Image (tube, rainbow, N blue to C red):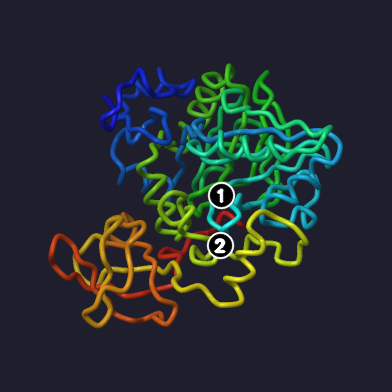
Amino acid sequence: MVSGVSDAELARSPLHARHEALGAKFAEFGGWSMPLQYSGVVDEHTAVRERVGLFDVSHLGKASVTGRGAREFVNSCLTNDLAKIEPGRAQYTLCCDDAGGVVDDLIVYLRSDDDLLLVPNAANNAEVVRRLAEAAPAGVDVRDRHRDYAVFAVQGPRSEAVMATLGLPTEHPYMSFVDARLEDVPVTVCRTGYTGERGYELLAAWDDAERVWDAVMRAGAAEDIAPCGLGARDTLRTEMGYPLHGQDLSRDIGPLQGRSGWAIGWSKPQFWGRAALLAEKEAGPKRRLRGLKAVGRGIPRPGMTVNVDGSPAGTVTSGTFSPTLRQGIGLALLPPEVADGTEVEVDIRGRGERFEVVRPPFVQTRSSSS
């Protein structure tokens, strides 16, 4: 059993046997049985911050949008402006509903005006595909490719050395991608990641997953590479203040509240949720996602109440123990008038623990944008 759901009901990565052999502990993520940890969350987190880690993130969704006018069509649906990037670049964007809620946040890889690959979150892949397919004009094909590709994340300050050992390209800019070969396997090398460290994400055919994983682990041995689970992925992204859909962004937490308004092409004439989001922008969001850093020993968790001047004012959306800072950190929805530097209390099992409101990231890294 994984998180109260039988293994038979969960989808599995093509690398499930590799994870079992490494002694992984599994958990349910978006309907998939995925590694939560191997040696431990703190050890794996530290490996990524100090050396290099390898994540299997094949549970992430994949969808293709192809055909004449595909780029223009996707640009009329998703929030960010695809006119701002060229083929070979990737873009973070949002799929919103008519009310301005976030159906999903995702990455779009622009191969050409007629060929785009989308990578949504695992649990939302089918819904994103459904919405796009229903809206697509004649000649534009939207296809679910969830089990066509495996996805790997090679993250950390020594990630470039591992890639070089594999003979893969390393110098393309952040949020770009190139096609290459790893031994005899075609791979797409993306300068993307979710950890705040320099890193790469590799897309390969589903059936080639074990060969790619084994090759990366062999090449990374000299750099003391560590297999990493989704527990460390969560602590790493929280230290950077990156939102997680379903917690920090959702149908009820729109992009302006979730501090993702930068991913909206406001000047575009059309995208899903545009009218509602413009109205909210004009009025100003009633709550915004803020960072919380523990003053004492408290560790915040999602759903906990945040009190300002003794009265309930907000809710923790993400919270964890920061392995880097060795203290509790979190993200919370708070009224916009609560300023950075304000001391608040989080109700942790009936006890008010002190936290400072701060602007993420909580940790300064050498940056995945370098």
On the rendered image, what quadrant is the C terminus found in? Answer: bottom right
On the rendered image, what quadrant is the N terminus found in? Answer: top left
Residue drawn 51% across the image and 72% down it: 285
Mark carried by residue 260:
2
Distance from Cα at disc 2 to Cα at disc 1:
10 Å
Residue at the limit of the structure toward the left, as seen here? 350
Which amino acid type corresponds to the residue marked 2 in the rendered image? Ser
Crowd tier of the residue under label 2, counting other residues whose Cα lies within 10 Å: few below 14, some 14–19, many 20 or above? some
Residue drawn 44% across the image and 45% down it: 51
Is 215 rendered above or below residue 344? above
Residue drawn 62% across the image and 35% down it: 130
Which amino acid type corresponds to the residue marked 1 in the rendered image? Asp
Instruction: Give the left or right position of residue 304, taking residue 244 as reference.
Output: left
User: What is the secondary structure assignment of the residue under circle 2?
Assistant: loop
Residue drawn 44% across the image and 22% down it: 12
Q: Which residue is mark 1?
A: 105
